[in-house]
Amino acid sequence: MLPTHFQDLLSKLERPQDDTALHWVASQNHSTIERFAQSRRFQQTQEAILTSLNDKSNIPWGDLYHDTVYNFWQDDNHPRGIWRRTDEASYLTTTPQWETVLDIDRLNEDESANWSFGGADLLYPHFTRALVFLSSGGDACEIREFDLLSKTFIADGFFLPESKSEITWLDINTLLLALDAGGDSLTTSGYPRCIRRWQRGTSPRDAPLIYSGKTSDLTVSASHDHTPGFEKNLVHCSQDFYRSCTYLLTEHNKLEAIDIPDTASCGFFDNWLLITLTATWQIEDKIYPAGALLAIDFNTFQQGQRDFSTLFTPDIHTTLLSYSSTRDYLLLNVSRDVVGSVDILKIENGQWSRVQTLTLPDFTMITASGINVMSNRYQLISYGFLQSYSLSYGDLDNKTLNVVKQAPECFDKTNFQVTQHFAQSLDGTRIPYFQIAIKDLALTGLHPTLLYGYGGFEVSLTPEYLGTTGITWLQKGGVYVVANIRGGGEYGPEWHQAALKQYRYRAYEDFASVADDLIRRGVTCPSKLAAQGGSNGGLLIGNMLTDYPSLFGALVCEVPLLDMTNYHRWLAGSSWIAEYGDPDIDEEKKWLQRYSPFDKVSPDESYPSVLFTTGTQDDRVSPAHARKMAALMQQQGHNNVWLYEETEAGHGSAPENSQAAFYEAMINEFLWQMLNER
């Protein structure tokens, strides 16, 4: 039984802004900073990371509207960033001439505020207005209407205070609104449950109701497809993360259901309805597998016809990650053994055919997306663990594809190589993982190795440029490993569903099998092996801590879920019941307790050193998880437990490059101390 005063502390730690909790956090931060953010090595690492983040030759990723490119940019002169634009011709040069549209640092100074830029929604087709999203750290945003000609906020324009509301333009005077007004306007997950049509000059609370979901639903949203000749309004209701329904909003404000399985999702390409399956669908004598992409004329589908064209069928190696379109083509982003390629499809005389497949060697990932629906131009982004990002523009009419932007290389990749390996999990499943290390790595078992994983929500860990990790880890002699465990989407819906709910343990067995394989192969040993993961990946790391402590010398557990018998009570927690289970159901609570690190940690066990991190402004995964876990372990007498909470961060990274560099350097220092200097 925990002491009464400690139970009282745990209760206060559950409240993000509680004064006692914030005082305790400040004390924890002080200890962590004193230990891991004071050395000369830390300072050098921080400087190297910050230099890379602020490098003015980084690609200015942009969104193209007609011939204007908009970009959001942060560097040492613009800590919170500037939203800027240039014409496409200038963008394609090495030194674009940018025009600042909105300076967030100046806005904060003028308003004595602490805003971060959360993006913008531009009004089609002339793009003279925008809805700008401003966040104070979390997912919630204040929404303001902005004039893109005068570059000023519109004083009497559309406005919503900071909330989780969602809006989309219908026309210059009308929005589709999913309103977060608190109380019964929200689902139990804390998201809007009603869709309204909001007219300029009226109160959003008085806007006519279009659709009302249940409080037990996850969320509702609305969208407008402005493809010329195929315009449509859609209302979408998610019952949970994996079940949903979509409606067509007719000109007469009627809702027509799009009758697909509630486990499927849909999109549109001109007159075609595109259906992505996450479960097998049988219609009469035809069976369509999970992971397939189907197409059918939308009007005939609504009239009851079910004669589908199959555009993609998965196999044991291949899954569909996403798709996009140009005027005449579909671009399928496909993963083959966790490496990306692009299949280009075209419809001619009612028949679909694959006209081209794009691939690159050396585990290089590529993804494609259409630039606009008025042409057959597209952009292709390529990258790999050792390949910095490259942006190319292609045109399917004249079959051209040219590199237009190349990101700088953060480190010399000459002496490193990427290899793919497969570990065998406890039930015999082959688990792929990538290893990035020096060429001809001597298998001495003594290399400091960092193993990264996620394993949830059908998220795929495909190759990403290591960037500053190359500077801080590879060049210092470390080995970096990415594990593609079940629960993710690397091999489609079934790979994800194999580790859902009561089968969650499979993801943890998979990750442990990769750790075992690294040790068996002679890459590393337990005292030199660290693991890192965030959010759902933080839950993964928490289970490595409690169930596989002998495999690791250090663990980094970021913005984690850890108290799995209470997670549904905080913030957006109940939205993940479909992934984990419901603690209010006795049978499900039992399996949740089996992978709830907060419930399993013991004063009688010996654990590897662990650093928990979180953000005070996180309004998705409560900072209570990391706080309570660190406090409990310290109370149990574990002295190798640290916590760092970024006071201005939400669920993502810190809002400024300097804060991100500090955070990454501190984690790096923790790992090097724990693996090399004990």
Image (cartoon, rainbow, N blue to C red):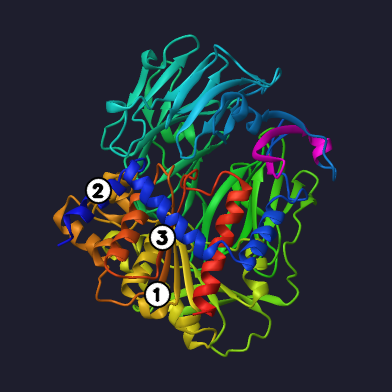
Q: Position of residue 663 (x, y in %)?
A: 55, 56
Say whether marks 2 and 1 touch (CB < 8 Å). no
Q: Label 3 near label 1: C-beta < 8 Å?
A: no
How far apart are the two marked residues, 2 and 3, measured between alpha carbons? 21 Å
Q: Mark 3 highlights which residue? A: 538
Percent coordinates x, y for residue 502 in the rendering: 26, 62
Quadrant where the N terminus sits is bottom left
Q: Nearer the viewer, mark 2 or mark 3?
A: 2
Report the magenta residues as a range: 73-91
- The relative height of residue 371 versus residue 321 in the rendered view (above or below) is above
Is 534 rendered above or below residue 416? above
Residue 166 in view in this figure? yes
In three-dimensional space, the C-alpha distance between marks 1 and 3, rounded to whole angstroms, equals 15 Å
Relative to the observer, which residue lies in front, 281 or 432? 432
* Residue 67 visible to the viewer: no
> Residue 608 — which label?
1
